[in-house]
């Protein structure tokens, strides 16, 4: 699985959009980009994933650059409950099933 | 429904105790996982079960013994643990090889 690079921490004002970047410059054509988050002392929560196209669900949007070397997770209207560690994970579609977590980005939403 | 349940929520055990962690899902998922998470670190894979058979063991010490009695249940048997084994133990499941994994809330283990 390709390695990812994320900023260690970010702040965001409540009600504003939170844009969390992830660099995955060694990504292969068959590797998906997954985003999970972990609120303090809870299990990781799946947010969204994508291969090439941008994706949106009720939680967030995922923007993947055309060359697929980086992506951005967008929380459109951050709330205090979105304070968490956000993990960007690159994973092959087939083969090893497990997720390899990096260090993630600690997002602090400020009131 | 994407719920994975884990019991107990918290566990304190001595180094000579034997205890078990339990994980359950009723989503019909055929792959189940154990991860270990130390404080301020990301989760790390321990074991993967696929169709109730152990498919990956990440060189985990034998004092951790996984068991998958049926497709909905995953256990982790603990024996003669060390204080450094204190961590959050996370269970996850997925419907297949390339499907999204869903995590339980974890069991926080303290070994004295």
Image (cartoon, coloured by chain):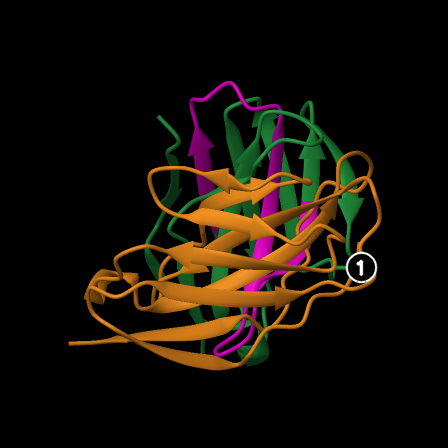
Chain colours: A orange, B green
The residue sitting at 51% across, 46% down in the picture is B91
Main SS, magenta region, reads strand
Residue B32 on the magenta segment? yes
Residue A85 location (% of width, % of height) = 43, 68
Is residue B109 toward the left or the right of residue B92 in the image?
left
Q: Chain of mark 1?
A: B
Q: Tell me where residue B67 sits by quadrant.
A: top right
Badge count: 1
Residue positioned 38% across, 73% down in the render: A107
Q: Is residue B99 magenta?
A: no
Spot the residue most to the left. A111
Residue A68 vertical position relative to residue B53 in the rendered view, above or below: below
Q: Is residue B64 left or right of residue B56?
A: left
Q: In the depicted view, which residue is nearer to us: B39 or B110?
A: B39
Q: Position of residue A33 (x, y in %)?
A: 64, 49
In terms of depth relative to the viewer, which is nearer, B74 or A90? Answer: A90
- Left or right relative to A45: residue A62: right
Q: Quadrant of residue A88?
A: bottom right
Magenta stretch, residue numbers = B20-47
Q: Tell me where residue B54 appears, x and y as whole percent.
A: 75, 36
Which residue is the site of mark 1? B59
Identify which residue, B60 or A76, lies in the foreground.
A76
Asked if one can make out residue B24 in the rendered structure from this viewpoint, the answer is yes
Give the position of the N terminus of chain B as an image quadrant.
top left
Question: How many residues crowd around disc 1 within 10 Å: few (fewer than 14), some, or many (20 or more)?
Answer: few
Residue A7 x/y as whole percent: 55, 79
């Amino acid at each position: 699985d390709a390695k990812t690079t994320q900023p260690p921490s970010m702040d965001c004002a409540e009600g504003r959009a939170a844009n969390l970047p992830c660099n995955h410059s060694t990504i292969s054509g068959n590797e998906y980009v997954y985003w999970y988050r972990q609120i303090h002392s809870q299990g990781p929560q799946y947010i969204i994933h994508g291969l090439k196209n941008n994706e949106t669900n009720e939680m967030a949007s995922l923007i993947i650059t055309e060359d697929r070397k980086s992506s951005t997770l967008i929380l459109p209207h951050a709330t205090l409950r979105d304070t968490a560690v956000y993990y960007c994970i690159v994973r092959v579609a087939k083969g090893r099933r497990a997720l390899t977590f990096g260090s993630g980005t600690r997002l602090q939403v400020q009131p | 429904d994407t719920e994975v349940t884990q019991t107990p929520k918290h566990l304190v055990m001595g180094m000579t105790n034997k205890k078990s962690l339990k994980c359950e899902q009723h989503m019909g998922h055929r792959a189940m996982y154990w991860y270990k998470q130390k404080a301020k670190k990301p989760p790390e894979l321990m074991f993967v079960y696929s169709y109730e058979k152990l498919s990956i063991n990440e060189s985990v010490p034998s004092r951790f013994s996984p068991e998958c009695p049926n497709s909905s249940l995953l256990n982790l048997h603990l024996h003669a643990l060390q204080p450094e084994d204190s961590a959050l133990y996370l269970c996850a499941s997925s419907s297949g090889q390339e499907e999204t994994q869903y995590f339980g809330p974890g069991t926080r283990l303290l070994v004295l």
